[in-house]
Image: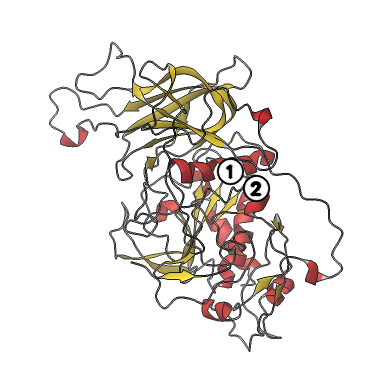
Amino acid sequence: MRALLVTSVGVTCAAALTLPLAAPASSAPVLSAASARPPSLTTEPGTDTTDTSGTSRTTAPDTITSDTTAPDGAEPRAAKSAAAPAGSTQSLPLAPLAVPSNRVAGAPAVQGLPQRDARPFSLVGVVWDDAEAELHGTVQVRTRATGTTRWSDWQDVETHNADHAADLGSAEREGRTVRGATAPLWVGDSDGVEVRVRPESPAAPGSQDRAATPVPLPEGMRLELVDPGEDPAPEPARGAPANRAAVPAVFADTPPTAALPEVLTAEIAAASAVNAEVAELGASVIPALTQAETAESVNLAPGAKPYIGPRPRIVTRKGWGADEKLRERNFGYTKSVKAAFVHHSATGNNYTCKQAPSVLRSIYRYHVKSSGWRDFGYNFAVDKCGNIYEGRAGGVTKAVLGAHTLGFNTNTMGIAVLGSYGSTNPPAAAVTAVSKLTAWKLGLFGANPKGKVTLVSGGSNKYKKGVKVKMNVISGHRDGFATECPGARLYKKLGTARTSSAKLQGR
């Protein structure tokens, strides 16, 4: 059992900028308990589901369904409270569909849902009971734009089985109902859906290839329809600060740092952050700093030259409207940030940058309410316009334990570029944002973006637990797990990101 580090600033600093806390004695993740309230995938009566014919009905209390209590049509978007972007999730069990005439004997049945109405939603995904079970097959959905009769073409949902997740045996897996899940897919404002899950075809009759034996689809498959809720109200306009002390980035009561080595180590950065407080808590945006201002913010001695890139502008969790009641209120930390894993969210590219906060709220709800995770999986996210967003709660400068790269979450951070980049080139603005973010965050922990690092695997489908693996400091998800993520096109851009990031650090 991992030790618990109790802190009084856990809740107030969820979206605040603070430097890394003093490192624990070992590299094992540490949980900081701010309260005892964990999230739960609740079972509530009166929610919407479907029977095997696709007919809407009201369920009994023992059916796992939506986390909203109103039946279909009872919660139109216009009637939602303007106080908070609450959002909702509809969970609809899948069932065998009609058997096609050309079905191969012995093949598992296709499962899904016929066309049906639903309360408005914007993101879809499929989950199942066993987080360790793999979905060997294809998932496709069609959706109907809200208030129209216009149906989309069939869209593929990426079945990235368990590769974005907390490490096996970790505190995030213990005592939680974690589920297997596909990637979520952003479909835009919709009120109708159809889904089909086709298992892989079995071997030809008479084949002796045991590897081709059909694998049943996972049990308990459900379609999750996520409504992100409304965007948070904009903050009132503020006058220009009289000086830098009024900007949220400035720290108070931080002891001065003595002469530093040329490379700023995590331990020195942590020591300089004891009892540090942000001048203004609860900001929607953490403003960018110049390189000199960034160095000043960590109280470097005059003449010291650490390799830290300028701090980029970061939209906080408050800025994109994260509902802090959803997540577990404990924060998980590791000792350092030695590497960054770049991902794509696989949510598709049919979003506008104005919709990015809605995409983030949807992924957040899907990770917590549908998949059973303790919080948003990635430490940061980047949209196609190059905007950078705070991801998992715990402090943007801290070594926050994420759930982004199975087997390699300890002492790393995960950055998700919103979109799918297998066959689509990532926008230059997004790649530049990755460079800026890594130059700053890795610099806080003395990591060279062009360097190599040795990480110890926590166990994945590519490396057994305990294996030491030498990787690039900026790696793609596929470097730690056998997956297509972050997509071939984005993966090819990581060399550019490494070079640009190192340059921003002054290397």
Rendered location of residue 332, percent (x, y): 47, 63
Q: Residue at x 50, y 61 (%)?
A: 35
Left or right of residue 494, residue 477 in this image: left
Rendered location of residue 49, percent (x, y): 43, 25
Q: Are marks 2 and 1 in contact (CB under 8 Å)?
A: yes
- Colour scheme in the image? secondary structure
Q: Is residue 182 visible?
A: yes
The answer to whether residue 473 is above or below residue 320 is: below
Q: In the picture, residue 245 is in which quadrant?
A: bottom right
- Residue type indicated by callout 1: Arg
Q: Quadrant of the C terminus?
A: bottom right
Res. 187 mark = none
Residue furthest to the top: 101
Query: Which residue carries the number 2 mark?
Result: 320
Left or right of residue 41, residue 175 in this image: left
Q: Which residue is at the front of the view, 18 or 67?
A: 67
Q: Is residue 473 visible?
A: no
Left or right of residue 401, residue 432 in this image: right
Left or right of residue 221, residue 261 in this image: right
Rendered location of residue 108, percent (x, y): 25, 25
Q: Quadrant of the N terminus?
A: bottom left
Rendered location of residue 303, percent (x, y): 70, 85
**Mark 2 / mark 1, whichever is N-terminal:** 2
Secondary structure of the residue carrying tag 1 is helix
Query: Which residue carries the number 1 mark?
Result: 361
Whole-number angstrom distance, CA of label 2 to CA of label 1: 7 Å
Residue furthest to the bottom: 259
Q: Residue at x 71, y 58 (%)?
A: 283
